[in-house]
Amino acid sequence: MIKTMAIGEPIFKIKYFEEEKNIEIGQMGILVNLSYDNKRDIMIEGIPLAPMKGTVVGHTMLPEIDKAVLIENYEEAANDPDIFEKISKAWPVMYSLRPEERFKGLPFYHAVGENAINEKISIFPDCIAAPKNLGLHKTHARDIDEYHCQVLGYGKMQKYHEQDFDTCFQDLNMAPGIVHDVIFDANGEYPWHQYQSLTPAVFMGIHITR
């Protein structure tokens, strides 16, 4: 199955693949292995991309995919000097969609459209057009395994002992294509955490319903 996702348009072209073989990748794109359940690697020129990890990949053929999402036009977006201005005009401000105090006044934009890959997996492309903290939080609206993939720019996921920026105990640095390590424990509990942009950045949230 190959599914074209509406989320991210008109900025990004995103496709979901499930149980596909011999997938040709042309220009450089961002690939995330979503085989959260079957735990199958994606082989890239004989080298495995592990489940729930991502990379920038192109000019190759992928012999087999269990589940994966591909941002096809990453190379084009990364080379566009006006990309953040275009996003600010195309996507609504996050605070207008989720009026949480931590988002108030931020140049933080959220893609709209169909974001459910299936009944278990959803993706959420976001843009923060400045180096900013996005606010500490510990719980989510749904019971999920949460990951993020860096798409443009640089950022990091941070973990904290308390709801206090002086209590950070781990930085998970992210460049394009990187999906950070697990941020929840064996019981599915999260510490206080946040995404921080180090540059103007686009990142994609990945939510897997438990």
Image (cartoon, grey):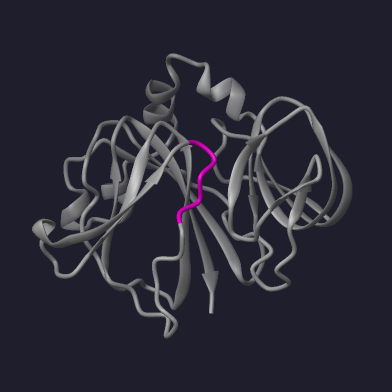
- Residue 191 is left or right of residue 38, and the answer is left
- Residue 133 is left or right of residue 150, and the answer is left
Tell me the quarter of the picture where residue 36 sits: bottom right
| x 57%, y 36%: residue | 9
- Residue 29 is left or right of residue 85, and the answer is right
Q: Is residue 178 magenta?
A: yes
- Residue 112 is left or right of residue 66, and the answer is left
| x 60%, y 65%: residue | 121
Which is more toward the observer, 85 or 190? Answer: 190
Residue 209, position as x, y percentages in the image: 54, 74
Kindly give the residue lying farthest to the bottom in the view shown.
Answer: 187
Q: Classify 53 as above or below 84.
A: below
Residue 186, position as x, y percentages in the image: 44, 82
Which is more toward the observer, 109 or 38? Answer: 38
| x 50%, y 16%: residue | 80
Which is more toward the observer, 163 or 144? Answer: 163
Q: Is residue 26 magenta?
A: no
